[in-house]
């Protein structure tokens, strides 16, 4: 299975984005703050997949989803914050209406 061919899905029932890779589930949990804003609160990748780019692929997929759907984010998860520091072009998706302190 090729990671590049694996897509991120929004599981609205569980308020999380999911990536199923190598029969393991990686997730980004979120809280819907309003119709246009998601607080990204937690990222989880199975320990057996760490260091293989799964977390980065997951976050990139989440940000692409957010961008396609004209949403904004509040990065409340340290992994998301680190990703945004390494890829500052995505900072345009950060909400100016909310901050982590508002959560």
Image (cartoon, rainbow, N blue to C red):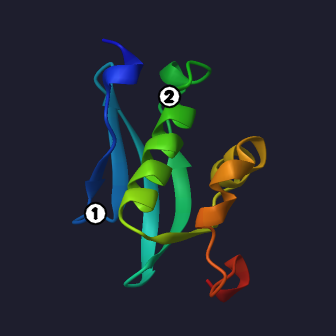
Measured along the vertical axis of the image, is residue 5 above or below residue 30? above
Q: Which mark is residue 72?
A: none
Measured along the vertical axis of the image, is residue 69 above or below residue 52? below
The quarter in which the C terminus is drawn is bottom right
Dot 2 falls on a residue whose secondary structure is helix
* Residue 56 picture location, percent across and down: 57, 35
* Residue 10 picture location, percent across and down: 29, 55
Measured along the vertical axis of the image, is residue 68 above or below residue 59? below
Name the residue carrying label 1. Answer: 14
- Which residue is painted at 54% across and 57% down in the image? 42
Residue 22: which quarter of the image?
top left
Measured along the vertical axis of the image, is residue 101 above or below residue 52? below
Residue farthest to the top, as pictured = 1
- Which residue is painted at 69% across and 81% down in the image? 99
Q: Dot 2, how many residues are within 10 Å of its Cα: few (below 14), some (14-19), or many (20+)?
A: many
* Residue 83 picture location, percent across and down: 68, 44
Residue 65: which quarter of the image?
bottom left
Earlier along the polypeptide chain: callout 1 or callout 2? Answer: 1
Q: CA distance from mark 1 to mark 2?
A: 20 Å
Residue farthest to the right, as pictured = 85
CB atoms of marks 1 and 2 within 8 Å: no
* Residue 71 picture location, percent across and down: 44, 71
Left/right placement of residue 23 relative to residue 56 reads left
Residue sitting nearer the eye, 21 or 2: 2
Q: Dot 1, how many residues are within 10 Å of its Cα: few (below 14), some (14-19), or many (20+)?
A: few
Name the residue carrying label 2. Answer: 54
- Which residue is painted at 38% across and 58% down in the image? 68
The quarter in which the N terminus is drawn is top left
Left/right placement of residue 56 relative to residue 13 reads right
């Amino acid at each position: 299975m090729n990671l590049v061919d694996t897509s991120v899905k929004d599981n609205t029932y569980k308020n999380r984005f999911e990536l199923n890779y190598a029969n393991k589930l990686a997730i980004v949990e979120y809280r819907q703050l309003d119709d246009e804003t998601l607080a990204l609160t937690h990222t989880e990748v199975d320990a057996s997949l760490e260091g293989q780019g799964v977390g980065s692929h997951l976050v990139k997929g989440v940000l692409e989803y957010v961008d396609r759907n004209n949403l904004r984010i509040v990065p409340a998860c340290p992994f998301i914050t680190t990703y945004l520091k390494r890829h500052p072009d995505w900072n345009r998706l950060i909400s100016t209406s909310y901050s982590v302190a508002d959560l």
